[in-house]
Image (spheres, rainbow, N blue to C red):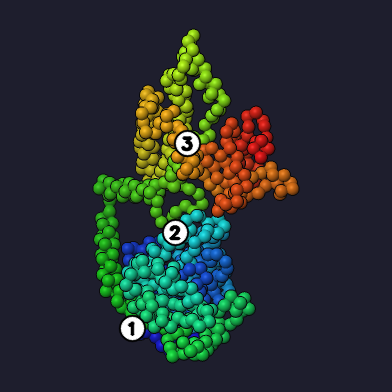
């Protein structure tokens, strides 16, 4: 490793790396990026691609957390600094030197859990780590979470998209070089890292390819064409490395010993021996040092212009405060307008959605919750409407007889149809109005969270909240009036000529078409998910998790989400639902399906 230190990039440009590091630290502490994109190298790759091993090879020490699933859950800004001494420093623990690298690993894990929790969630908030060592060249790298496709534990279902959005925030910037780490024993053309890099760097101008696991390739195959830049060419080329295997890591194999084995592998392999001097971790470190210094040189003019503009803007703002008068009405108006504009932007992000670092990872809120109310809660409330088929038949019979009076009718009178349908349509009022109440409740809750940012101006915050809440309440009543008017319109006239009206003549054809297509009308899926079914009996374990599918006509459960092994289907005819109190120390929502006549529904339908 020490041999690599003697070869470095342009000394004048390399002196800028520590300056860029200090700027990166300052921006992180301020919590803003000041619209300035610093030159940097982002490390991108799938899970188990070997990203951590590549970074540890540079230092020659084990210091990055390892395990199953997503281990890197926050961006790690790793600043490698050549120094006679060997130790680490964290920006969040200023003044504290970590001489033992096992303590660095523990600190990364604890700092990650402090922000994201222990449920494998992710956060955009970076961890800044400086590693001083005689074995490294001056390089700054950003280690990003590995790409994943399947949520683990309590991770949100869209964890893949969240990670992609986080990675895109870094690699989409023109000032960012992309270190795409790909295992050589997989199909390079389908590499997640290379495909993601290509989406923002289609010409391959900013991407550096790294191939790992060459020692695990099938016998008779090699990656020579890729390394010679003939297959999927990149302007900055590819470098191959051989990392320690999991067995080596578990066996505490020394990294320096592994580096010797890496060198021996390339020199002894017939496909790589002629290019061995351009392969391996020491060469990769040298390449990254040169690429970063050259990249800083290329981006320096634009960076200088942006800094000067930012400086002049801040200087102008500071100049205004020299003559600041608290009683100046224009200052007050400006502050108020800025606060209102910020409130508008925050509300829009909360409803429309955003990938900001403040996104709620614990529960649904804002637009996501409103979406759920419309597409899950409302259909559920419709299904829960009390509907007794026997009672309906009885009502129809009485209506027909009462309309005919003393006469014996030959045909079903239209009035009977109108009366029965109107009674059913009227039942839509309660769930519809309830939906409006729930949506308004969520909007007001969102507004209260947002206006808390105005706590510097208590009276402005109170007045803003009052005005917005009053406006929402006015629109709430108008919305309810409109819904009730719509239902009244439906009650006023039954259009039997409408295409959705089946009628007696079309009933048979509709039924036959439904049987042919396999689609049953009115049996839409309302909700799917895992639930625990209780009261199975002690011999069956008391309770068990199954994959449930709730439709408007039945409740089915399967062994798993593939929905192939159906365990049971329970028709919902003549059945009702009721909420049940959760058990002690339990947060799970529970409900019961029951027969009003106290019959055992499971045995009845078994």
Quadrant location of the C terminus in the rendered image:
top right
Q: Which percent across, then down, holds residue 221?
A: 49, 81
Eye-nearest disc, 1 or 2: 2
Vertical position of residue 198 compared to residue 81: above or below: above
Cβ atoms at labels 1 and 2 below 8 Å apart: no
403 vs 244, left or right, is: left
* Residue denoted by label 2: 161
Asked if residue 144 shows in the view, the reply is yes
The numbered mark, 2 or 3, whose residue comes first in the sequence reads: 2
* Residue denoted by label 1: 12
Comparing 168 with 526, the one in front is 526
Vertical position of residue 317 compared to residue 137: above or below: above
Eye-nearest disc, 3 or 1: 3
C-alpha distance separating marks 1 and 2: 41 Å
Q: Which percent across, then down, holds residue 421?
A: 45, 25
Q: Residue at x 37, y 24 (%)?
A: 493
Q: Secondary structure at mark 2?
A: helix
188 vs 204, left or right, is: right
Comparing 366 with 268, the one in front is 268
Q: Residue at x 41, y 76 (%)?
A: 209
> Within 10 Å of the Cα at label 2, are there few (<14), some (14-19), or many (20+) other Cα atoms?
some
C-alpha distance separating marks 3 and 1: 81 Å
The numbered mark, 3 or 1, whose residue comes first in the sequence reads: 1
Q: Which percent across, then down, holds residue 248?
A: 60, 79
Vertical position of residue 152 compared to residue 246: above or below: above
Q: Residue at x 39, y 64 (%)?
A: 168
Asked if residue 127 shows in the view, the reply is no
Comparing 318 with 370, the one in front is 370
Which label was assigned to residue 511?
Answer: 3
């Amino acid at each position: 490793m020490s041999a690599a230190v003697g070869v470095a990039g342009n000394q004048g440009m390399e002196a800028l790396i520590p300056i860029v590091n200090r700027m990166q630290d300052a921006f992180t502490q301020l919590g803003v990026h000041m619209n300035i994109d610093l030159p940097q190298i982002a490390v991108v790759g799938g899970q188990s691609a070997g990203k951590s091993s590549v970074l540890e090879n540079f230092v020659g020490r084990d210091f990055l957390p390892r395990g199953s699933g997503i281990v890197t859950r926050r961006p790690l800004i790793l600043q490698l600094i050549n120094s006679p001494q060997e130790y680490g420093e964290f920006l969040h623990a200023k003044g504290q030197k970590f001489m033992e690298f096992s303590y660095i690993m523990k600190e990364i894990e604890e700092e990650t859990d402090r922000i994201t929790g222990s449920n494998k969630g992710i956060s955009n908030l970076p961890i800044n780590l400086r590693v001083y060592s005689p074995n490294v060249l001056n390089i700054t790298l950003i280690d990003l979470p590995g790409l994943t496709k399947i949520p683990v534990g309590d991770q949100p279902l869209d964890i893949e998209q969240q990670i992609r959005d986080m990675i895109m925030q870094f690699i989409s910037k023109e000032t960012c070089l992309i270190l795409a780490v790909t295992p050589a024993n997989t199909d390079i053309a389908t590499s997640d890292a290379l495909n993601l890099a290509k989406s923002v760097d289609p010409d391959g101008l900013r991407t550096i390819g790294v191939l790992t696991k060459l020692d695990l390739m099938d016998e008779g195959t090699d990656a020579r064409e890729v390394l010679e830049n003939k297959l999927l060419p990149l302007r900055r080329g590819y470098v191959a490395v051989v990392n320690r295997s999991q067995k080596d890591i578990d066996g505490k194999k020394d990294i320096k010993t592994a580096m010797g084995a890496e060198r021996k592998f390339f020199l002894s392999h017939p496909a790589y021996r002629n290019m061995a001097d351009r392969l391996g971790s020491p060469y990769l470190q040298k390449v990254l040092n040169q690429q970063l210094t050259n990249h800083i040189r290329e981006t320096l003019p634009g960076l200088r212009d942006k800094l000067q503009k930012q400086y002049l803007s801040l200087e102008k703002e500071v100049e205004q405060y020299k003559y600041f008068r608290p009683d100046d009405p224009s200052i007050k108006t400006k502050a108020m307008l800025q606060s209102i504009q910020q409130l508008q932007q925050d509300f829009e992000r909360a409803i429309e959605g955003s990938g900001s670092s403040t996104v709620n990872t614990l529960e649904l809120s804002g637009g996501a919750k409103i979406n759920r109310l419309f597409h899950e809660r409302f259909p559920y409330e419709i299904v829960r409407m009390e509907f007794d088929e026997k009672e309906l038949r009885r009502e129809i019979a009485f209506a027909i007889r009462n309309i005919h009076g003393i006469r014996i009718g030959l045909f079903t009178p239209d009035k009977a149809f109108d009366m029965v349908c109107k009674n059913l349509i009227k039942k839509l009022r309660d769930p519809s109005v309830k939906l409006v109440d729930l949506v308004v409740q969520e909007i007001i809750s969102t507004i209260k969270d947002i206006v808390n940012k105005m706590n510097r101006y208590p009276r402005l915050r109170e007045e803003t909240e009052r005005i917005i809440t009053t406006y929402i309440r006015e629109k709430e009543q108008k919305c309810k009036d409109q819904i009730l008017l719509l239902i009244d319109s439906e009650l006023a006239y039954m259009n039997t000529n409408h295409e959705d009206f089946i009628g007696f003549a079309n009933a048979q054809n509709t039924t036959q078409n439904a049987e042919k297509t396999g689609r049953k009308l009115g049996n839409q899926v309302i909700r799917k998910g895992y639930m625990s079914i209780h009261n199975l009996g002690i011999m069956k374990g008391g309770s068990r998790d199954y994959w449930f599918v709730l439709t408007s006509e039945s409740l089915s459960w399967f062994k798993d989400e593939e929905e192939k092994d159906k365990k049971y289907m329970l028709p919902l005819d003549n059945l009702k639902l009721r909420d049940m109190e959760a058990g002690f120390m339990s947060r799970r929502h529970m409900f019961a399906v029951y027969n009003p006549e106290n019959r055992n529904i499971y045995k009845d339908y078994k």
